Image (cartoon, helix red, strand yellow):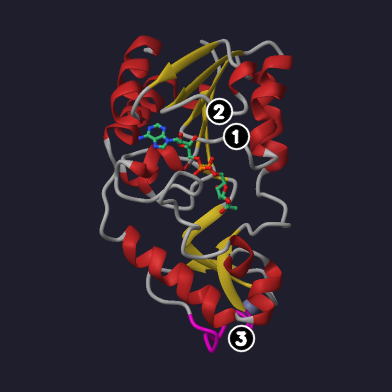
Amino acid sequence: MKNIFILTGAGISAESGLKTFRDAGGLWEGHKVEDVATPGAFAVDPELVHHFYNMRREQLATVEPNAAHAALARLQEHFGEHLTLVTQNVDDLHERAGCRDVIHMHGELLKKRCASCEVVSPCTGSLTYDCVCANCGSEGRMRPHIVWFGEIPFFMDEIQEKLIEADVFIAIGTSGVVYPAAGFAEVAKHHGAKTIEVNLDGTEQSPLFDEHIIGKASETVPMLVERLR
Ligand code: OAD
Ligand code: ZN
């Protein structure tokens, strides 16, 4: 059986109602990235950063996975361990659609982490500066379990291994401008994978892909999944 590596980005969740980062009307328009998504911003104004992620967490509770998430769950059922699903998204829509072992390289909105003891725990409600760590008792050290700009994404060793083994690499709904994820297609291709890009439009990375599927993820991903199965 072939090994399939899938990388998803904000575009797969767009039709569920979660804004993408860089599209017109995207998430950062009202908030400058450097005001909310960096360790420096958190050091200067933790309440602003908490507020920003609390709002996103609240919004996440109001949306549902779409047909693209559901299709990937079917693909995983078929390919089992031969399918690796890496997402840059911090939402839980892949999981809610039935996917297992999703690799959240940029962290998860529904988890928090203590900056003192590094213990990660569930986070469904609001996070505030005065939150006390249940593990080590530290106060004012709890942060969203999110990879900020300037921080190293999670699971990079495992991702690298799977990229090398991949026979097919598929990028869905990602603009391909944020590294290291933006470099995955090149690594997979270099090691012999066929590369497929699924997006509303072309991206900066498009020349690296062997095949381009243009359109809304909710329509294109189910078709692609049928083909792969
Ligand atoms: P972007 O907002 O940069 O890109 C979203 C991509 O999805 C664009 O290329 C769109 O053309 C495409 N798109 C939008 N709607 C779509 C649809 N319905 N169907 C298919 N494609 C669609 O989002 P990402 O590439 O995920 O990092 O951004 C990467 C990272 O930058 C994020 O994970 C985040 C951000 O800074 C962190 O939070 C660490
Ligand atoms: Zn702690």
The answer for how far apart the CA atoms under marks 1 and 2 are is 7 Å
The answer for how far apart the CA atoms under marks 3 and 1 are is 35 Å
Residue 101 position in % (x across, y down): 49, 40
Q: Nearer the viewer, mark 3 or mark 1?
A: 1
Q: Which residue is mark 1?
A: 176
Residue 80, numbered circle: none
Please indicate whether residue 164 sits to the left or right of residue 209 in the image: right
Amino acid type at image mark 3: Gly
Residue 47 position in % (x across, y down): 53, 82
Residue 144 position in % (x across, y down): 55, 68
Q: Nearer the viewer, mark 1 or mark 2?
A: 2
The first of marks 3 and 1 along the sequence is: 3
Pointers 1 and 2 in contact (CB under 8 A)?
yes
Magenta residue span = 128-141
Please indicate, yes or no, whether residue 134 appears anywhere in the rendered image.
no
Residue 140, numbered circle: 3
| Image: 63 above or below 178 | below
Residue 169 image-quadrant placement: top right
Does the magenta-highlighted stretch encompass residue 7?
no
Q: Residues within 10 Å of mark 1 (few under 14, many from 20)?
A: some
Identify the residue shown where x is 67% and y is 57%: 149
Mark 1 residue CB less than 8 A from any atom of ligand 1: yes
Please indicate, yes or no, whether residue 8 appears anywhere in the rendered image.
yes
Amino acid type at image mark 2: Thr
Q: Residues within 10 Å of mark 2 (few under 14, many from 20)?
A: some
Q: Which residue is mark 2?
A: 203
Identify the residue shown where x is 29% and y is 61%: 61
Q: Nearer the viewer, mark 3 or mark 2?
A: 2
Question: Could you tell me what secondary structure mostly forms the magenta stretch?
Answer: loop
